[in-house]
Amino acid sequence: MVKYNFSKIERKWRKYWEEKGLYKTKGNKKKPKYYILDMFPYPSGDGLHMGHTESYTASDIIYRFKKLQGYDVLHRQGFDSFGLPAENYAIKTGVHPKKTTEKNIKNYIKQMKMLGFGYDFSNLIRTSSPSYYKWTQWIFGKFFENGLVKRKTDEINWCPSCQTVIANEQVADGKCERCKTKIKQKEVPGWFFKITGFAEDLIKDLDKVDWPEATKKNQRAWIGKSEGAIIKFQIISKSKLSKSNPKSKIQKNENFIKVFTTRPDTLFGATYLVLAPEHKFVASLPENNDLMIRNHEDVKRYIERAKNKTEMERLESKEKTGVKLEGLVAINPANGEKIPIFTADYVLGGYGTGAIMAVPAHDERDFEFAKKYNLPVREVIESENKEQRTRNREQGTRNSKEDCEVYVGSGILINSGKFDGMDSEEAKRAITEFIGGKMTMNYRLRDWSISRQRYWGCPIPIVYSPEGEAKFVGEENLPWLLPEDVNFTPTGEAPLAKSKELKKRTEKIFGKGWTPEADTMDTFVDSSWYFLRYPDTENEKEFCSKEKLKRWLPVDLYIGGAEHTYMHLLYARFFVKAMHGMGLLEFDEPFIKLRHQGMVLDKNGVKMSKSKGNVVNPNDMVKKFGADATRMYMMFAGPLEEDVTWNEEGVKGVYRFLEKIYNLFQNFKFPTSNASKELSRLLHKTIKGVTEDVEGLKFNTAISKLMIFINECPRHKVLPREAMEKFLILLSPFAPFIAEELFNALKSSPSSPFKKGGEPVESIFNQKWPKYDPDMVKDEMIEIVAQVNGKVRDKIQAPADISEEEAKEKVLASEKIQKHIGGKEIKKIIFIKGRLVNIVV
RNA sequence: GGGCAAGUGGCGGAAUUGGCAUACGCGCGACACUUAAAAUGUCGUCCCGUUUUCGGGAUGAGGGUUCAAGUCCCUCCUUGCCCACCA
């Protein structure tokens, strides 16, 4: 037993690979291309975690596999290096984010090298470097010129702790996704990308890509397309109806509220209207001379409260609240009925028109509200189901306190005038047409708010004229540098506003009175296009040359966490579609194939987290077991897309496997003779199995096949050198260090590998992935399973190509089979070629 | 509340996609080597009864389709993840 000195071996090859520039993409156009992409990390102070280790190992395996198969492979890495943690650290310590970020990046690179990831480390991109963000700004400029960017003052999510605006997608449970602080609504001017204009394509084109179905489904749900109608309700003052009001003349037709509904077929059942507290109509009431609201103070108070609703209130009581707008009524356009109007926070300001027609008989939320405020419930849809119909018959408009069910399905119309008896699907169009409304598509997706009042981000390349007009700074002024003379302490005002240098720069270029935009961009902007930069990281004239875009994009395989389903993947797709529309790209989907890795759990199956103190550090594992064993265990522990339980006891298993290989190569001599038939068969089966498994990202079973091969080796007297070389190539994507070591040892010293100490001869990664011979993976003799009534009773050795007749004959000749037939009549005999014979009695 | 994924030995997990359930690995047991231990090697290891043989049962629970179900269909239970008043 020779000691497997992994640290010595790994150190040696790490150095050698770097010196030889093994991972530089050479760009051989004669070879087919393959672009494999990792989700680049944010360089945090904690360093690479096990989740990175897993997904980067997976992509590294694919990279090496494709390279060995003769592909020209692009496999780059970079850092999403703008962002809040570095800035927050700067606020605490005064250390500039640039410094901490660079320091963290160095650590990440060290760790990536340690794990043997085959990146070209000479040109890793950083989104925070001017040579990168110059192009982020350039793309912003293109969006600006093409009308895809708008400035809007809006009620927007404001995080009081981060002192910045955040996107809808970054709010979870009413809290800031980053710092868990309760989000407030605040009126802030800011820049938006018009992603909503792409909603339809973002849904439709999901059909073109090979992504996990769940991810596609979630994206569709997030975009949230629904077909419905916009219906106008006229609003009038109750007082104006009576003659007591002397001002009353003819009702003006200007006061309308538009509602969005997916169920215009239920219009006759709309017994009240509800406006979101944010709805502009409510705010405009005091100035409205036509409409006198009697309880304005109450309404104002309610709106204030809704705005500041605490987290606790939101979670614990789902009970609906609201206030009636006293003195006003709406006219139901279908039947002319006067119905009350409410404002209530169960209606969302940001969806549809921010107003709904309430149909309590056919909507659970409306029903709940109606019950609480004792509002009428009128059934207008009858289920086609008979039992339900008799139960519902003749109930008409009821008092909502009565116990009744809400029927949300489709059916036949009742209580709906001339539409009675019509099918509800048909009635949607008919009723909409009847009242002069129109059918529309509505999306849940909001425009993407990208302005952040933070320092450590990409400056928005906009300046304002003395008149306040926004202007793109122009290509010639890019990169529009992030100023250095800035105090990071958050005050609610954007830090860049305090930079004298930025103000001076702006006036110098554009003239006196011009002012710079002080907001920086959401970091999701930086990560929405980085994969377009990878093929051409050094290009100073273009974000990527046309030629290289054509050569490399779109990405063939993207591997990363499922947590990016909504934001990153959606935004990246939007960028590509927008750039495609401007003629900058020839393709319109960035990632052809996408796969997620699962989470890494501790040995008790609990998610690793700092607060639980159960985080496993890849550095420790590499120190203890080596990079090869660490990589291999991650892949062996289970399927890539499922969670991995990190159990050190389990790592021992792959460690022992590597040690076994190492020793096997010391103790045997490897003659150039031919392999025995049996060994050849095993080798070819292994080649086939491993190739297919790697292609399907089934690394766990690929490794088990490698193990089976090695387990069999001691049974063979002769292990020919060619077979063992092929084995090492199969092993190399998983355990690159040991494979390289043993391969070189084998090459350098034909009879006794280790006599000469295994000096580097040629890298295993410049070899060819072995091919299997289809004839060699088939066995000559096979075992036919013999069943009686589906139960295995015997196994019979037979030639692989045995005919149906022969197989049946052989099985019937078996004593065991005859015993189980027991003289009964044979009804049927099933024969599955090469597999089984089943006798049915 | 909705969506998605998953339930297979003591544990991580396999199963040619409907055809021998439990590959591979961990753990455990016995033996060998050793003064001893570790390491390593060999054999064994789903459960029950007979302990070579043989028979029965088992893939969360129950039902169905089929010659044949871990795999397909229906009902239910459990766990995890994501989204949650989207009209």
Image: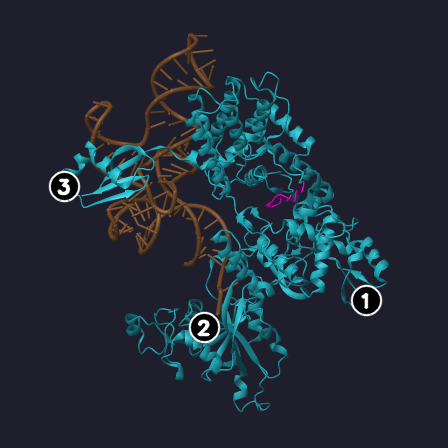
Chain colours: A cyan, B brown
* Residue position for label 1: A466
Compared with residue A738, is residue A424 higher up or lower down, i.e. above or below?
Answer: below
* Residue position for label 2: A263
The stretch in magenta equals A26-42
Q: Chain of mark 2?
A: A
Residue A22, horizontal then vertical, whole percent: 66, 34
Q: Chain of mark 1?
A: A
Q: Amino acid at mark 2?
A: Arg
Between residue A515 and residue A224, name the one nearer to us: A224
Where does the C terminus of chain A fall, quadrant-wise? Answer: top left
Q: Secondary structure at mark 2?
A: loop
Tell me: A722 left or right of B68. right
- By secondary structure, the bulk of the magenta-drawn segment is best described as loop
In whole angstroms, how far apart are the C-alphas of marks 3 and 1?
102 Å
* Residue position for label 3: A824
Compared with residue A303, is residue A516 higher up or lower down, i.e. above or below?
Answer: above
Tag nearer the camera, 3 or 2: 3
